Amino acid sequence: CRGIRRLRIVALDLPTSYQRMQDTKGDEFTGRMLGAINSMLVEMMSAIARKDYEQLRERQAQRIEKANIRASRSTPICTSV
């Protein structure tokens, strides 16, 4: 059986993600605290991104529906001369 592997996400605009990479072995509490904060921030950013994505898809669907309604109401253009 293999041991547990952990993935660290590092983002330039998320200082807690790279602060944890500094030497915190002497202070286990700080390392764990930064890890917990980073995990919460990543989860929050993920939830916000998902919500934004869903809103974008909903707005696109509304625009498409509105365009289809407009297209069905418009009179056809006569092409015969």
Image (cartoon, rainbow, N blue to C red):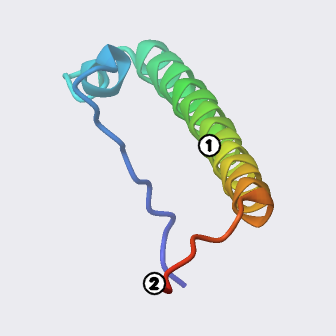
Residues under numbered marks 2 and 1 in contact, where contact means CB atoms less than 8 Å apart: no
Residue type at mark 2: give it: Val
Quadrant that contains the N terminus: bottom right
Disc sitting over residue 81 in the figure: 2
In front of the other: 55 or 27: 55
Task: Left or right? Give the position of 30 relative to 61.
Answer: left
Residue 14, given in percent of the width and then of the height, sits at 34, 20
Secondary structure under badge 1? Answer: helix
Label 1 packing within 10 angstroms: few (<14), some (14-19), many (20+): few
Q: Which residue is drawn at 36% across and 45% down?
A: 8
Q: Reading the chain from its start, which is encountered first: label 2 or label 1?
A: 1
Q: Where is residue 49 in the image (x, y as percent from the top left)?
A: 57, 38
Tell me where residue 13 appears, x and y as whole percent: 28, 20
Name the front one of labels 2 and 1: 2
- Residue wearing tag 1: 56
Q: Is residue 39 above or below residue 63?
A: above
Element class at badge 2: loop
Q: In this view, does 14 lie above or below 53?
A: above
